[in-house]
Each structure stands twice: as structure tokens, then as C-alpha cells.
């Protein structure tokens, strides 16, 4: 694949080369601190940062750097500013040459920087026999975006949906179902929105079974015996368990398809998958001297942790740690993972810190393998408080999506009353899912955020709908150009750019850098922010630079159409990497 280096990267390389010439060797590899600037295209702050340590005047050092950097072909000017900044402006011709290369290259010329990586991404993780709720949204969408971006950058991505499908709760539920054969749940249909159906009934039956388990000691004993039967492979028990798992996976898949995420049934590796290897994990940790006895249980003591990590219970059962350790070992040995990413609630931070440290001590996590807890915060209601139903219960994910769809339909109908019912339904669907996803992915994953449907579906401001609308606006311009016979446009380096054109060109050249930021930090909000900045730059361009007006010279029109086409392609690709549809009409 043809790869196109960004001009920002070339500016940084030029400053680095100049630093290597004028600075002592021990300072030559310091960060040149090249950043976007309001006073020029870029500002390099290395001279101001390093002058005191080098023992020189910052403006003098900046002047020496300027004399070397100014010779770069892509630059229009390099000036010393203030106490020692370098203000750097790119040449229009260099920008247009680079955009032409991007427009012609597959994948917009973005380098496949992650090609040596096998990323195993663990995300979503709902529980069998329970409906997906609002708490599953963040992990599902963040994990999906990371899988898309890392894959686009060349990584081999292994998606893992670690569903909860094993343990005491299933013995309890199965025993209850056997004792209440009249409890109807199999024949209930799943709605088009993923609600209702067998899993909804199972969810309610589970709560009933839990109450009986807590108040009836004899039922508790029978349920515990059923757990043993499940774990030992009793045919009748396993058959019931498989039926429950199958119904749950079907319900999960309907939600995933509604959200438009990549997860399929093939990506499911539930807790039950690792059950045969749990004893092997315990044995390996014991043989390596990592396990200690604690009141009959097998635990790992870690110096920086206040409590030991439970691996095997005193009754021989296994803790969650055993399953997660088996997962790490499998991801490395069987899947070849060299970057393990767990998109899980931030409240699990201590658990994963202990898991990773134990895996390092066991020799599974070596220097060339990275394990990361990509922690995510929680979703609050519009009032900033924990998102709950009016009765204080957990909000079903399908209900949340329904609310977004209803509000999007109202907003779209108000904006264009002439739409047919089918058109309205489709646009509302695309807009509502895009709104939910962008609201999630435009926030740093580590922070909490408020789910405010009215704000999400707005056509203005930093919303998914605004980005989708910008895309359709550009698509409309390009259609009109084709109808008028104006052609597709082409970049001409000889054409001088207006300030708004230059600003838009700068944004277009930084698409790859935004993706690299996501790959490095596992923060999809960096891509979301980039796309919003690109959409704003296009709006400013379109308001000040006519494209199809008759008095626009042909070569300028061609250049502006090329800018429109590349902006549309970049928006579409960026939205796709966030899992958001880029509609042609809206």
C-alpha cells in the first residue's frame, strides 16, 4: 500500500535534524515540541524549553534552528517569535502536492504502522441470561472503535467477547427452571429492537430464583448440587445450560447488529471456554512458587497490593482471577497476541493490576508483550447522576437506544417535513445510532459522561449528527458539480490558497496523525475530536470560498472540488472507524 507521510511529520523531522546540528549530543534527541498554532501553521518550542539547560539565550538558539529549518522545501516561512518560538508556515504547493498523493492512495495513504502487532481486544462482556444494560455500552463501543482503528493501521486484530456464562448463578437458574417447568420463556419472540424474548424472561426468572436461593436453605443446597452437576458435565444440566447460552447469544447479536458493531458469535469466548484450563493455571503458578496458602485457599501476594489475589477457593472452586489468568495465557500462547487490551470498567483497575503483575511473574507477559487495562468511566443521566430507571433499576440498553431513535425521528421530521415515512425511519435510525456512538466516543474513555438525548441528536455543535450532516452536505455539492459537468476536481499546486482553504488542507493532512494518537493512547476521542475539527474547517471553507459559482475560475473550482472530495472521503473513513454510518442524504 502506498503510504503518505504527513507534512507535520516532515516539519518535526526538519526541526529534529536542526537540533542535532546545533545542540550537544545529550540534548539532540529531545522532543522538538512541534504543535499546531494560531500564529502560523506550526510552532516549535524546543529552543525555549532547552536554552537554559544548554546555557544559551532562547532567541539566539531559535535563530540558529530557524536558519537550518528554513531550507526545507515544504516551508513558506520560518520566523522567530516572542521569547524563542519558531513559527512555521507551509507552502501552499507542498500542501496541495501532499493532498493529491493522499487522494490517490488506498486508505488515504495512512501508513500501516501497527502491522507488526497482534492486538487481542477483550470488550463488551455481557452476562448470559441477563439483558444487556447501559453499563455494557461503553465497553462495546470503545472496543469496537479500537478494533477498527488498529485494524486499519495494519494490526492483526482478535476480538474477544468474554461473556459471563459460568458459575453458581447458572446452577441456581437451571435448578429453578427444572422445578418450575411451567415457567414460560422459550417461546417469547425477540422484538426488532432486541428487547423481549427468552432472555428478558430469563432475566426476570433469575431474579426470582435469586430470591428463593437467599431465603430457602434447601433450594440453595439443591442449586449448589446443580452447579456441581454442570461442572461435572451432567447431560441434562449441560443441555439446559446450552439452551440458555444459545438464546442469550442470539439476543446479544441483535443488539450488536442494531449498534453496527463488529462482534459476532464467533468472537464469543465465555468463561466456560477457559474452565478446562483453570487447574492447569493453578498448577503452573504453584510450580513457579507464586501461590501461597491462606486459610485453605490458594492466593498470590503482591508487594504493592493491600490484599492477596484469590486464585483457588478453599472448596476447590476457582476465583475470577484464575479465569483471567487463563485468558492471558491463551491470548499469548494460542492467539499470538503481543498487545492485550481489556476494555473494562475503571472500577476493575486493582484486579487487572494484580492479574498483569502475576502474569509477568509467571513469565507469560514478557518484555515484548503489552497488557493494558483500557479503563472506562460510567454513563450518567442528563442530571449528572448515575443512570437509573425511575424505579431505581438498571436501564436496559435497548430502551436507551429506543429513546435516541424516538428523539432523532422528531428532530429529523421537524427539519425536513417532506420526507416519506420510509426515508424518515432510515435517516432517524442512522442519526440515532451515530448520535449515541459519537457521544460515547467523543469523551475520554476514562471519564464519566452524561447521556443527554436532546444534545446528542442536535444538528449543531459537537455531535455525530453534525458530522453526518456535513458529510451529506459535501456529497450534495459533488452531485451538483457532476450534474453541471464541472468534473471531479483536481489539486493544482500552482493555485494559491485562500486562508480557509489552507486551513482545511492542514486538517486533511493530519488524519493519519489522529489515528496514530488513538493507537498510542487507546483513546478513540482523539479521532472524534479530529473529525469535528475537520467538519468545522470545511464549514468555514464553504462559507468563504464559493465552489460552483459561475464567476469562480475553472482552476480554482477544480481545486475546491478536490478539497470537497477529499474532505468527504476523510470524513467517511473517520466515521467508519468510529463505527458510524456516513449517509449520502440526510
Image (cartoon, helix red, strand yellow):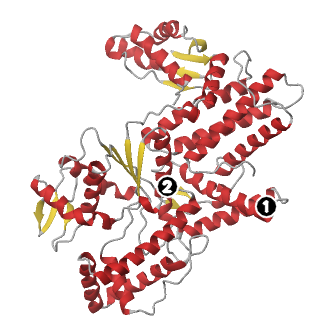
Residue depicted at 75% across the width and 50% down the height: 585
Say the numbered circle drawn on residue 413: 1
Residue 5 vs 439, above or below: the answer is above
Q: Position of residue 256 (x, y in %)?
A: 53, 62
Residues at discs 1 and 2 in contact (Cβ within 8 Å): no
In the picture provided, is 313 more to the left or to the right than 434? Answer: left
* Structural crowding at the residue carrying mark 2, measured as other residues with C-alpha within 10 Å and reported as few (<14), some (14–19) or many (≥20): some
Residue 16 vs 318, above or below: the answer is above
Q: Position of residue 233 (x, y in %)?
A: 26, 77
Residue depicted at 52% across the width and 19% down the height: 11
Residue depicted at 29% across the width and 56% down the height: 327
Most distant residue in the right direction: 550
Residue 362 shows up from this direction: yes
Q: Position of residue 428 (x, y in %)?
A: 70, 60
Task: Provide the secondary structure element on which disc 1 rests.
Answer: helix
Q: Using the rendered view, name the quadrant where residue 493 is placed.
A: top right
Q: Position of residue 249 (x, y in %)?
A: 46, 69
Point out the frontmost of discs 1 and 2: 1
Residue 132 shows up from this direction: no
In the picture provided, is 321 more to the left or to the right than 484? Answer: left
Q: Count how many numbered circles sit on residues in the image.
A: 2
The first of marks 1 and 2 along the sequence is: 1
Q: Using the rendered view, name the quadrant where residue 228 is placed.
A: bottom left
Determine which residue is flagged by label 2.
448
Gap in Å between the C-alphas at discs 1 and 2? 31 Å
* Structural crowding at the residue carrying mark 1, measured as other residues with C-alpha within 10 Å and reported as few (<14), some (14–19) or many (≥20): some
Residue 140 vs 560, above or below: the answer is below
Residue depicted at 77% across the width and 38% down the height: 478
Say the numbered circle drawn on residue 261: none
In the picture provided, is 114 more to the left or to the right than 409? Answer: left
Amino acid at each position: 500500500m502506498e503510504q503518505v507521510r504527513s507534512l507535520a511529520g516532515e516539519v518535526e523531522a526538519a526541526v529534529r535534524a536542526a537540533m542535532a546540528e546545533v545542540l550537544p549530543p545529550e540534548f539532540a534527541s529531545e522532543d522538538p515540541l512541534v504543535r499546531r498554532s494560531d500564529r502560523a501553521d506550526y510552532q516549535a518550542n524546543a529552543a525555549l524549553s532547552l536554552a537554559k539547560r544548554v546555557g544559551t539565550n532562547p532567541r539566539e538558539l531559535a535563530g540558529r534552528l530557524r536558519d537550518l529549518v528554513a531550507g526545507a522545501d515544504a516551508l513558506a516561512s520560518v520566523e522567530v517569535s516572542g521569547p524563542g518560538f519558531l513559527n512555521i508556515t507551509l507552502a501552499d504547493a507542498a500542501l496541495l502536492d501532499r493532498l493529491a498523493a493522499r487522494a490517490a492512495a488506498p486508505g488515504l495513504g495512512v501508513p500501516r504502522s501497527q502491522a507488526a502487532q497482534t492486538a487481542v481486544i477483550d470488550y463488551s462482556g455481557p452476562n448470559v441470561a441477563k439483558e444487556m444494560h447501559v453499563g455494557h455500552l461503553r465497553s462495546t463501543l470503545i472496543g469496537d472503535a479500537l478494533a477498527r482503528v488498529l485494524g486499519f493501521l495494519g494490526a492483526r486484530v482478535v476480538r474477544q467477547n468474554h461473556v459471563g456464562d459460568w458459575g453458581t448463578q447458572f446452577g441456581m437458574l437451571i435448578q429453578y427452571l427444572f422445578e418450575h417447568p411451567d415457567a414460560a420463556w422459550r417461546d417469547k419472540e425477540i422484538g426488532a429492537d432486541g428487547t423481549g424474548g427468552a432472555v428478558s424472561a430469563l432475566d426476570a426468572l433469575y431474579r426470582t430464583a435469586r430470591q428463593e436461593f437467599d431465603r430457602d436453605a434447601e433450594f440453595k443446597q439443591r442449586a449448589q448440587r446443580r452447579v456441581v452437576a454442570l461442572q461435572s458435565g451432567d447431560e441434562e444440566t449441560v443441555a439446559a445450560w446450552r439452551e440458555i447460552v444459545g438464546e442469550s447469544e442470539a439476543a446479544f447479536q441483535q443488539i450488536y447488529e442494531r449498534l453496527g458493531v463488529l462482534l459476532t458469535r464467533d468472537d464469543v469466548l465465555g468463561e466456560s471456554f477457559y474452565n478446562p484450563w483453570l487447574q492447569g493455571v493453578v498448577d503452573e503458578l504453584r510450580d513457579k512458587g507464586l501461590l501461597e496458602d491462606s486459610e485453605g485457599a490458594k492466593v498470590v501476594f503482591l508487594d504493592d497490593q493491600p490484599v492477596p489475589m484469590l486464585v483457588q477457593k478453599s472448596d476447590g472452586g476457582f476465583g475470577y482471577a484464575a479465569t483471567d489468568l487463563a485468558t492471558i495465557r491463551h491470548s499469548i500462547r494460542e492467539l499470538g497476541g503481543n498487545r492485550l487490551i481489556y476494555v473494562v470498567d475503571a472500577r476493575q483497575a486493582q484486579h487487572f493490576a494484580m492479574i498483569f503483575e502475576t502474569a509477568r511473574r509467571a513469565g507469560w507477559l514478557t518484555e515484548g508483550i503489552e497488557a493494558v487495562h483500557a479503563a472506562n468511566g460510567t454513563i450518567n443521566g442528563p442530571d449528572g447522576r448515575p443512570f437509573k430507571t425511575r424505579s431505581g433499576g438498571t436501564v436496559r440498553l435497548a430502551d436507551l437506544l429506543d429513546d435516541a431513535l424516538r428523539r432523532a425521528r422528531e428532530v429529523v421530521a421537524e427539519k425536513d417535513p417532506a420526507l416519506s415515512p420510509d426515508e424518515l425511519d432510515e435517516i432517524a435510525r442512522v442519526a440515532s445510532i451515530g448520535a449515541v456512538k459519537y457521544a460515547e466516543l467523543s469523551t475520554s474513555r476514562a471519564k464519566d459522561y452524561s447521556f443527554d438525548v436532546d444534545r446528542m441528536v442536535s444538528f449543531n455543535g459537537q455531535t455525530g449528527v453534525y458530522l453526518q450532516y456535513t458529510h451529506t452536505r459535501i456529497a450534495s455539492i459533488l452531485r451538483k458539480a457532476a450534474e453541471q459537468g464541472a468534473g471531479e476536481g483536481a489539486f493544482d499546486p500552482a493555485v494559491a490558497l485562500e486562508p480557509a482553504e489552507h486551513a482545511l488542507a492542514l486538517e486533511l493532512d493530519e488524519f493519519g496523525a489522529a489515528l496514530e494518537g488513538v493507537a498510542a493512547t487507546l483513546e478513540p476521542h482523539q479521532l472524534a475530536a479530529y473529525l469535528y475539527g475537520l467538519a468545522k474547517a470545511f464549514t468555514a471553507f464553504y462559507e468563504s470560498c464559493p465552489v460552483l459559482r459561475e464567476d469562480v475560475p475553472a482552476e480554482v473550482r477544480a481545486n475546491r472540488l478536490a478539497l470537497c472530495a477529499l474532505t468527504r472521503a476523510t470524513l467517511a473513513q473517520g466515521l467508519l472507524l468510529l463505527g458510524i454510518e456516513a449517509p449520502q442524504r440526510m
